[in-house]
Image (cartoon, helix red, strand yellow):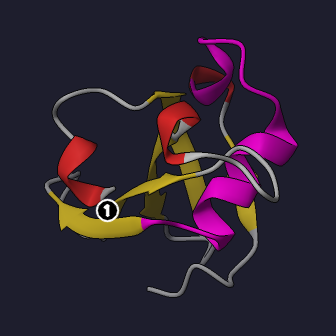
Amino acid sequence: MSSGALVKIDQSARKHGLKDEEIRYAVHHPFGFQQTLGNPGQPTIAFVGPRHEGGSRHNAIEVIVAKRADGFLHAFHAMPVTDRWRHLL
């Protein structure tokens, strides 16, 4: 799964007030990423990255994406980084 792919933003990823451009930036410029469990047949990756160019690790966000049947990466979760994904910093 390439972080260079087009990322579609699901409504659920906007729940914590992050903007689409912030979500996409974190996926395309991650500090770290790791495969995680998701729905069967949908490769799922957790990304931790900055919200914008020059963004700090102290203000990082986590974004979870799944590659769906349409071939696109869908961000379905995004929020300030939590302890669960902090190791990806």
Q: Which of 72 and 7 is in front in this view?
A: 7
Amino acid under label 1? Thr
Single out the residue that lies furthest toward the top: 16
Residue 29 located within the stretch drawn in magenta: yes
Quarter of the rendering occupied by the C terminus: bottom left
Name the side, left or right, on which 44 lies relative to 50: left
- 35 versus 13 height, above or below: below
- 14 versus 64 height, above or below: above
Quarter of the rendering occupied by the N terminus: bottom left
Residue 42 in view of the camera = no
Name the side, left or right, on which 34 lies relative to 46: left
Give the percent coordinates (x, y) of residue 58: 49, 35
Name the side, left or right, on which 41 lies relative to 51: left
Give the percent coordinates (x, y) of residue 2: 53, 87
* Segment tinted magenta in the rendering: 13-31
Q: Which residue is identified by label 1? A: 44
Residue at 82% x, 59% y is 53
- 72 versus 74 height, above or below: below
Q: Which of 65 and 52 is in front in this view?
A: 52
Which picture quadrant has residue 19? top right
Label 1 residue SS? strand
Residue at 70% x, 62% y is 7
Name the side, left or right, on which 8 lies relative to 21: left
Q: Nearer the viewer, residue 20 or 58?
A: 58
Residue at 49% x, 65% y is 68
Residue at 61% x, 46% y is 56
Residue 3 located within the stretch drawn in magenta: no
